[in-house]
């Protein structure tokens, strides 16, 4: 008899996501490239698990990969977004778009922080030093007491074209630059050109309207309609072609409606215009289209804003429209809300972002304590430890932030462990190298400031030199970070002599008789520089392994002359003076302790699996770890690399 209900063991592999199920003597193993648990696919799939997304993004198969390079991340996420818009709805991956906006903010802010550039025609210098203090909240100086904020008073200006008040101040201009609303010299045309280069004509028109330029908005929508018609040529008979032509008509109608705006008065012409604009918002084209949800949201926000100007709460429909970018909504608030209302709105936004894990909230907070709380909430909502590790690794937190430093360290260790579990050692190594290089640049900039070589001026009044008699002085040449010798990263592992236990990697200065003896030898020694006993032999060529002659290394270093900051390294530590080529390095197995020259070991394991020493069956190449067999992934990679035949 067969039981009516049977249960069996179910397991999921941490390495490749496969599902294994047993029932009686039958054993089933799932696929790594198909099904809801597959994480080996090279292409985006609808409803894929976050582990599949992280693995695909971390692979080093494309020029654009998810790494410490913000530009590369923007390119990769833009490619994902375009593929998702073509094949699926944006609701299947709702966090991809906010990640794209966040990395755009990171790239924009970091370029400003590294350049010390004048961001206006009044000589005001970008005040933030990094992502920690580049949030809009800090740029608007809401972190200081009200007694110290008297010099931050806003200038109120009445806009004749919009028939409403706008607010301006140096702090608000910094916030607009951080949100991407204006360029470094407040050039709106440059920002509009960037939007249209990405085919974001609707956002371009919205920015023009919110900057009181109705004519530029009309021109942008007309260019958008022409671009849609141009791309739909030859496809007008298909369903997609008819949709494109209908959307071009929608853009043209929106341009005509915006061009008819004549102010927020109560005259008959204004009443007629409001009715026409309201009827336009009721059209089906303004309420459907999942793939064009964001574009339509900007069109609706333009009309909604113009209809509700001057009404109580008329700006709320734009401020709380979640379909719009948070950067644009915050910049909108900086332009149209007075200071007390702006502070209340930003406080509400921070709370909402923290509760929902909305990652774009870092634009307001920066990567400070509240920003780390938002990152933690995002991780709890999505499980995307990859993004949290990459973002938190871009800052050096203060020493007294003990809890935050511990949290970021756990994210970093979890992501590195995940890559090691997937045996993606190349991706993990490249992440470590890129992270170390970024931290070195940040520390180099900190060293410049500590040595008094930075030309960064005060926050306010913002004039260089603060000498009105001489006028603005040209910036003095700065010492860049390659000229500063930072402390070398301490060795994680030492090779020691088998006889005297002297470290061979952390070479030390030799004195007296040993120094005289070493001065007569070659730069590479075949024996210990301390006890003169022979070093182990290579398991392949059977020649003695070599180490550097510390006397020759020190002599070569002295010939180079002094370096800036050389005193940061201990005087007797010569571990950073290595001139031994990689081919002559020696490596060994941590399990059986056998080894040899690096290039010999690499050549051996290219054709063998076990240790080269006779009688040793150690699988040194993976140190006891079984290499994953990924036939599905290998086949997809082969198909991508094959050249088309003619």
Image: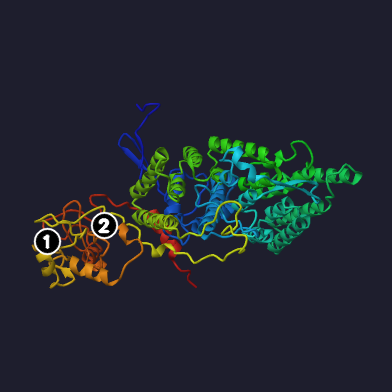
Q: Residue furthest front?
A: 469
Q: Which residue is mark 2?
A: 570
Q: Quadrant of residue 404?
A: top left
Q: Residue at x 16, y 72 (%)?
A: 522
Q: Residue furthest right?
A: 268
Residue 507, image x and y in percent?
A: 20, 60
- Residue 628 or residue 559, whichever sits in front: 559
Residue 50, image x and y in percent?
A: 46, 44
349 left or right of 580 in image: right
Task: Mark 2 or mark 1: name the one nearer the start of the chain.
Answer: 1
| Res. 501 visible in picture | yes
- Residue 55 or residue 187, whichever sits in front: 187
Q: Which mark is residue 452?
A: none
Q: Residue at x 18, y 62 (%)?
A: 509
318 left or right of 350 in image: right
Q: Which mark is residue 530?
A: 1
- Residue 60 or residue 436, whichever sits in front: 436
Q: Residue at x 10, y 69 (%)?
A: 517
In the figure, 7 relative to 329: above or below? above
Mark nearer the viewer, 2 or 1? 2
């Amino acid at each position: 008899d067969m039981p009516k209900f049977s249960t069996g063991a179910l397991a999921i592999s941490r390495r490749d996501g496969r599902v294994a199920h047993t029932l009686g003597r039958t054993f089933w193993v799932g696929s790594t490239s198909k099904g809801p648990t597959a994480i080996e696919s090279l292409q985006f799939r609808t409803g894929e698990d976050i582990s599949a997304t992280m693995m695909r993004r971390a692979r080093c198969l494309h020029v654009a990969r998810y790494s410490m390079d913000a530009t590369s991340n923007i390119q990769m996420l833009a490619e994902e977004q375009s593929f998702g818009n073509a094949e699926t709805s944006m609701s299947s991956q709702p966090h991809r778009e906010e990640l794209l906006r966040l990395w755009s903010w990171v790239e924009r802010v970091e370029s400003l922080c590294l350049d010390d550039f004048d961001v206006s025609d009044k000589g005001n210098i970008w005040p933030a030093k990094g992502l920690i203090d580049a949030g809009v909240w800090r740029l608007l100086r809401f972190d200081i007491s009200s007694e110290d904020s008297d010099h931050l008073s806003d200038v109120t200006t009445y806009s004749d074209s919009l028939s409403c008040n706008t607010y301006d101040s140096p702090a608000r201009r910094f916030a607009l630059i951080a949100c991407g609303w204006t360029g470094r010299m407040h050039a709106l045309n440059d920002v509009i050109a960037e939007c249209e280069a990405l085919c974001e004509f609707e956002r371009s028109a919205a920015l023009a309207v919110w900057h009181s330029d109705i004519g530029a908005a009309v021109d942008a929508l007309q260019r958008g309609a022409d671009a849609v018609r141009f791309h739909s040529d030859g496809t007008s008979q298909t369903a997609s072609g008819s949709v494109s032509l209908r959307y071009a008509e929608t853009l043209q109608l929106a341009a005509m409606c915006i061009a008819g705006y004549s102010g927020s008065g109560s005259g008959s012409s204004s009443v007629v215009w409001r009715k026409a604009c309201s009827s336009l918002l009721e059209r089906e084209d303004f309420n459907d289209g999942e793939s064009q949800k964001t574009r339509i949201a900007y069109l609706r926000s333009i009309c909604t804003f113009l209809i509700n100007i001057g009404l109580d709460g008329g700006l709320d429909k734009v401020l709380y429209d979640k379909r719009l970018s948070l950067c644009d909504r915050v910049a909108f608030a900086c332009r149209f809300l007075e200071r007390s209302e702006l502070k209340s709105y930003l406080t509400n936004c921070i709370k909402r972002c923290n509760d929902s894990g909305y990652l774009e909230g870092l634009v307001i907070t920066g990567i400070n304590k509240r920003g780390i709380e938002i990152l933690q909430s995002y991780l709890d909502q999505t499980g995307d430890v990859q993004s949290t590790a990459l973002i938190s690794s871009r800052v050096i937190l203060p020493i007294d932030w003990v809890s935050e430093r511990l949290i970021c360290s756990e994210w970093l260790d979890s992501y590195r462990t995940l890559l090691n579990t997937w045996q993606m050692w190349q991706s993990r190594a490249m992440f470590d190298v890129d992270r170390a290089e970024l931290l070195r640049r940040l520390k180099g900039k900190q060293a410049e400031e500590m040595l008094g070589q930075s030309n960064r001026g005060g926050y306010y009044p913002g004039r260089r030199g603060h000498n009105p008699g001489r006028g603005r002085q040209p910036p003095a040449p700065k010492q860049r970070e390659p000229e500063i010798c930072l402390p070398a990263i301490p060795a994680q592992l030492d090779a020691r002599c088998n006889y005297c236990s002297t470290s061979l990697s952390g070479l030390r200065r030799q004195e007296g008789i040993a120094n005289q003896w070493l001065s007569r030898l070659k730069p590479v020694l075949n024996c210990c520089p301390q006890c003169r006993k022979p070093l182990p032999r290579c398991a392949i060529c059977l020649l003695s392994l070599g180490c550097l002659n510390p006397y020759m290394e020190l002599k070569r270093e002295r010939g180079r002359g002094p370096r800036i900051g050389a005193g940061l390294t201990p005087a007797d530590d010569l571990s950073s003076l290595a001139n031994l080529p990689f081919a002559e390095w020696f490596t060994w197995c941590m399990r059986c302790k056998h080894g040899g020259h690096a290039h010999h070991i690499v050549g051996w394991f290219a054709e063998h699996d076990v240790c080269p020493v006779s009688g040793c069956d150690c699988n040194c190449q993976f140190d006891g770890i079984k290499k994953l067999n990924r036939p599905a992934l290998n086949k997809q990679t082969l198909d991508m690399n094959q050249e088309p035949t003619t």
